[in-house]
């Protein structure tokens, strides 16, 4: 059984490939992207993605700009920022822009698994609230 549908975005190809393997082994479904543009393309195609794991430092569109775009187009999708020591401030900016959390690289597998699961649970909770609110709106119209 799949725990959650993830999109892993990082410009370091070997890192993405290794993490994809490890997360898949831990029962996550993982889609990969190697830059910001690919991230947004993958979100268009894979409408079931629940959590984006997003590198802060990437050539071209950086993680903060990608986060902004994600939050405009898909506000319910949760984002976990991946940061190095040099980019901790960016990760904090990311939190202010609506990121769920951040992880320091090299990231601990257990932490990544735990945070990804928490983020997916939060997204599902938010979706349930939206559905409940819609149902309430329908039933109150009928009353
Ligand atoms: Mg990078």
Image (tube, rainbow, N blue to C red):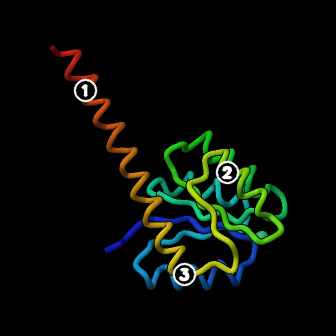
Query: How much space separates mark 2 and mark 1, taking CA atoms?
Result: 32 Å
| Among numbered discs 1 and 3, the one appearing first in the sequence | 3
Q: Quadrant of ligand 1?
A: bottom right
Q: Find out whether the residues at labels 1 and 3 contact each other: C-beta distance under 8 Å.
A: no
| Among numbered discs 2 and 1, the one appearing first in the sequence | 2
- The label shown at residue 109 is 3
- Picture residue at 65% right of the left edge, 66% below the top: 9
Above-or-below relation of 47 to 34: above
Q: Residue furthest left?
A: 143
Residue 142 at x, y percent in the picture: 17, 16
- Picture residue at 51% right of the left edge, 71% below the top: 30
Above-or-below relation of 68 to 86: above
Left/right of residue 118 with respect to residue 107 in the rendered view: left
Query: How much space separates mark 1 and mark 3, taking CA atoms?
Result: 41 Å
Above-or-below relation of 64 to 135: below
How dense is the environment of label 1, judged by Cα within 10 Å: few (below 14), some, or many (20 and up)? few
Secondary element under disc 3, as helix, strand or loop, is helix
**Residue under circle 2?**
67
**Residue under circle 1?**
136
Left/right of residue 142 with respect to residue 8 in the rendered view: left
Above-or-below relation of 132 to 100: above
| Among numbered discs 3 and 2, the one appearing first in the sequence | 2
How dense is the environment of label 2, judged by Cα within 10 Å: few (below 14), some, or many (20 and up)? many
């Amino acid at each position: 059984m799949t725990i959650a549908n993830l999109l892993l975005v990082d410009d370091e190809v070997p890192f993405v490939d290794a993490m994809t393997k490890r997360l898949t082994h831990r029962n996550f479904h993982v889609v990969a992207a190697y830059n910001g543009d690919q991230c947004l393309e993958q979100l268009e195609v894979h409408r079931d993605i629940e959590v984006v794991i997003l590198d802060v430092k990437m050539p071209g569109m950086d993680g903060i700009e990608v986060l902004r775009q994600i939050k405009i187009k898909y506000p319910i999708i949760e984002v976990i920022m991946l940061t190095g020591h040099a980019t901790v401030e960016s990760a904090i900016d990311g939190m202010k822009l609506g990121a769920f959390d951040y992880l320091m690289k090299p990231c601990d597998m257990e932490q990544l698994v735990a945070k990804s699961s928490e983020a997916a649970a939060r997204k599902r909770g938010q979706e349930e609230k939206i559905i409940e609110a819609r149902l309430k709106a329908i039933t109150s119209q009928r009353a």
